[in-house]
Image (cartoon, rainbow, N blue to C red):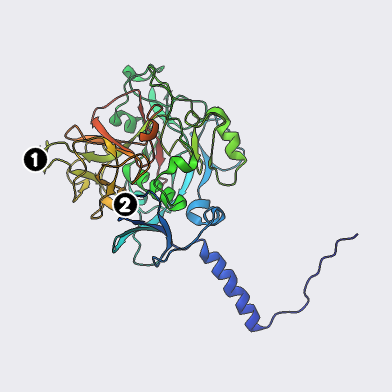
Amino acid sequence: MVDEFYTSTTVPDGEEMQRRLDMVKYLESFVTEPIGVQLDTTLNSPTLQRIDGNGDTITTSTSFFNKHVLYGGMRLCARNRTTGSIIYDDLVYDASTGYDLFVEYPTDRPRFSTDGDFYQWTIAPYGTESTKYNIAPFAVQRGGTEHSKIYIGAKEAYFYLDGATGKLGSASGKQPVTGGVSYTDLPSGSLTMTQAETYANNIGTGFGICNAWTYADINLRMLIEYATFDIPSVLGLGVSNKLSGTGFNGVLTGADSIDSRLASTTNGTGTGSGVNGETPVAWRYLENITGGNVFEMMIGLNMFHTSGTDGEGHAYTAGDFRVLKTGGMGTPAATLAYGDYVAGVTSVPNSTDNYISALQSVGVAPLLFMPVANAGTSSTGMCDTFYYPRYDPSIVLHGGYWAGQTADGPFCMFANCSSTYSNRIAGCRLEYYPTV
């Protein structure tokens, strides 16, 4: 039987043409509309409801997010170390051709609001004109210039020497750089936050290790896509159930054939071929971003254990936190200088390490998912652990490590670290702000 194809030879009238154009416009706008979630604070559940830009509950699908500009627009790419050019096809994952792997990350406009007992988070694309939505703080860091996109390391960073200059890379088959472990050419086996930022800065203008606002936005997008704080229960446990061991006991980047497994997906989300809890997880090509393998240093966030006065004569109290200015004019550093930060309004928990049970709702805290209480469990509240600050100031690590078990997760904050902290469990991830 011969297949037959029929084409209408009737030109639609003006009214029908307008109807069709309106439908096309609607379908195009649907994947660029604000999207969000709301948390019922009277419940003790990690599950949220998805909402639209008006705060009305909606039902979405995986295909919706794959088509949405803020999710489908996250693309795996590689940057040529010599020329700075970005490519998207024929990628070589192991850096042998002089490229580093990144995820192109479209910037957004987030909003937090409350409606009775509900906390509501929504995000809109960068081009949204509504005055309800302000540019995301991560989008203007490292200079104050608005970026329509930045680049985030697809892999945990590794260390290498470019001549005599230490730098960080992002590629498969590498041991994530951490402190306290023997690395060829890594000075003294040490990796403090300041050293990590310096090695990233050495790559060129616009490079650094991921700042606290970048991690917060990644968490926000994951929260909206899966409508739960318990991300590991949806995507997999990540590398979190191995023995503590000695030295580095995580896995190399790209382990368990995860690159080829992701290549067969439509959105770069999946796991390695190993056992759940011992194999990497990737969300939209960002490997191990959901927690596990190594903690990642979040530059630009300080917390305080006691009350006192800092070296510049400015007072702080127990449980205070400071974060890079939302306008991007602060300098990322292990210890934020006066004028580079905005201070929180409410204190973080300051006496016990435990699962986060409640979040702050004022000032800059909601977009950072800053805890106000950590009296929860691994299956209630926010499900991830907050380790309280012990130093003045403390720096904060993200995610978890290879033996963290249920404490790990993208909302986990490890503030049990001095500004010079260097440990075998703590690494970092690259971010790159291109010249606009």
| Kind of residue sitting beneath label 2 | Leu
**Residue closest to the eye, 391 or 400:** 400
Whether residue 36 appears in this view of the structure is: yes
| Kind of residue sitting beneath label 1 | Gly
- Point out the frontmost of discs 2 and 1: 2
Give the left or right position of residue 72, taking residue 361 as reference. right
Who comes first in sequence, dot 2 or dot 1? 1
Percent of width and height locating residue 147: 40, 52
> Of all residues shown, which one is farthest toward the right?
1
Position of 39 relative to 340 (above/below): below
Percent of width and height locating residue 396: 28, 36
Tell me, for residue 367, which label it has, or none: 2
- What residue is drawn where x is 29% and y is 27%? 192
**Residue closest to the eye, 81 or 345:** 345
Residue wearing tag 1:
313
Give the quadrant of residue 375: top left
Give the class, few, some or many, for how many residues have Cα within 10 Å of label 2's Cα (few <14, many ≥20).
many
**Residue closest to the eye, 136 or 187:** 136
Helix, strand or loop status at disc 2: helix
